[in-house]
């Protein structure tokens, strides 16, 4: 028996959407403020929650820099596509954050307000890394919100919802794990709108290739020549803010960067039918927060030392690294 088959043997657990909504009622509450990761997953999450629940996008956070509406408190926001290790802050994410479930930190309750895909199944990097969630945050959100609100998923939405976070690659690279997670999310049930994406009869493999080719062409048209323009770049590899302009005591995202982001959002909006309302998205009058980002090699000792430093967020990006973010005491989110 292969290792992945051995790990998946006997798996029959399924997500309890009713329990999640009862424990985290804010996830279906209308008119919430949110902060997005500035990539395609975060942007899709923002469009989805704005369209169906009237959520307001008040800022962006990439693990190194955060921009937030100057009049809005971080406590009044929900982070989408990013787990925040603060019990006062609500968040939703899908990264691998637990290292060893047999050695949970004493302050693990800092995630008490975090809806986290891998934590729902008690998966960790030490024992279960090959079983980690292979989809995107938007799919988890659609499953939860769709359990209470009627969703409509047009055929044109399938392509961007398979593109996000490279999900289409994972489906063919890790089929056993993807099939198990689709079963866990109840995507095989016709009443679940994830069924329209992953069990659709619209596309053959070749048709999907053609649809993805067309989608790539459309977003390549707004490319800056350094890769596909499917994210908002607010920091460089060293953590320095980029594409951000200071005006008096506030900041705004550079007009060229926000223009490209809006074009990408409009492309996504047209395909998904999730309306882009410019009044729901904050591009200026922002406060800037800078953080210290670092990484460690995964081990019990290193993870324990990292937790002692009270990281704001982190993710096990591979079997070789955990990237984490520390707050600057002079510019802390919670004072």
Image (tube, grey):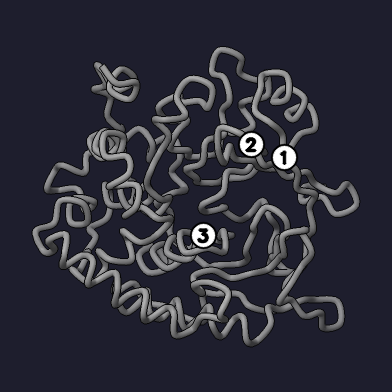
Would residue 7 appear left or right of 237 to someone viewing this image? left
Q: Give the residue at x 48% y 20%.
A: 127
Marks 1 and 2, the one that precedes in the sequence: 1
Provide the secondary structure element on which disc 1 rests.
strand
x, y percent for residue 21 = 38, 40
Q: Which residue is mark 2?
A: 321
Looking at the image, is 223 positioned above or below residue 151?
Answer: below
The residues bearing labels 3 and 2 have C-alpha atoms spaced at a distance of 34 Å
Q: Give the residue at x 47% y 48%.
A: 26
Q: Are marks 1 and 2 in contact (CB under 8 Å)?
A: yes
Asked if one can make out residue 285 in the rendered structure from this viewpoint, the answer is no
Q: Which residue is mark 3?
A: 32
Label 3 environment density (alpha carbons within 10 Å; few <14, some 14–19, many ≥20): some
The residues bearing labels 1 and 2 have C-alpha atoms spaced at a distance of 6 Å
Q: Which residue is mark 1?
A: 295
Label 1 environment density (alpha carbons within 10 Å; few <14, some 14–19, many ≥20): some
């Amino acid at each position: 028996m292969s290792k992945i088959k051995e790990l998946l043997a006997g798996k029959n657990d399924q997500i309890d959407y009713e329990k999640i909504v009862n424990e985290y009622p804010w996830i279906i509450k209308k008119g919430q403020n949110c902060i997005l990761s500035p990539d395609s997953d975060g942007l899709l999450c923002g469009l989805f929650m704005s369209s169906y629940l009237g959520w307001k996008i008040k800022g962006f956070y990439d693990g190194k820099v955060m921009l937030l509406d100057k009049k809005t408190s971080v406590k009044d926001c929900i982070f989408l596509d990013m787990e925040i290790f603060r019990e006062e802050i609500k968040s939703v994410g899908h990264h691998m954050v637990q290292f060893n479930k047999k050695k949970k930190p004493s302050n693990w309750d800092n995630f008490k307000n975090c809806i986290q895909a891998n934590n729902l199944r008690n998966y960790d990097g030490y024992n279960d890394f090959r079983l980690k969630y292979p989809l995107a945050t938007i799919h988890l959100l659609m499953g939860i919100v769709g359990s209470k609100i009627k969703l409509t998923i047009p055929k044109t939405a399938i392509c961007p919802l398979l593109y996000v976070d490279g999900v289409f690659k994972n489906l063919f690279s890790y089929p056993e794990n993807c099939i198990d997670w689709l079963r866990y999310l109840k995507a095989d049930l016709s009443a679940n709108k994830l069924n329209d994406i992953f069990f659709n009869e619209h596309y053959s493999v070749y048709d999907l290739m053609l649809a993805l080719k067309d989608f790539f062409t459309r977003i390549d048209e707004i490319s800056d020549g350094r890769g596909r323009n499917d994210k908002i770049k607010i920091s460089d590899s060293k953590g320095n803010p980029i594409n951000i302009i200071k005006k008096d005591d506030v900041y705004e995202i550079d007009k060229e960067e926000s223009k490209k982001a809006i074009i990408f959002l409009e492309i996504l909006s047209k395909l998904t039918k999730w309306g882009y309302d410019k009044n729901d998205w904050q591009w200026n009058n922002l406060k800037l927060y800078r953080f210290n980002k670092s990484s460690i090699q995964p081990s019990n000792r290193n993870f324990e030392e990292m937790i002692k430093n009270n990281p704001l967020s982190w993710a096990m990006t591979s079997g070789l690294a955990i990237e984490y973010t520390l707050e600057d005491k002079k510019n802390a989110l919670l004072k």
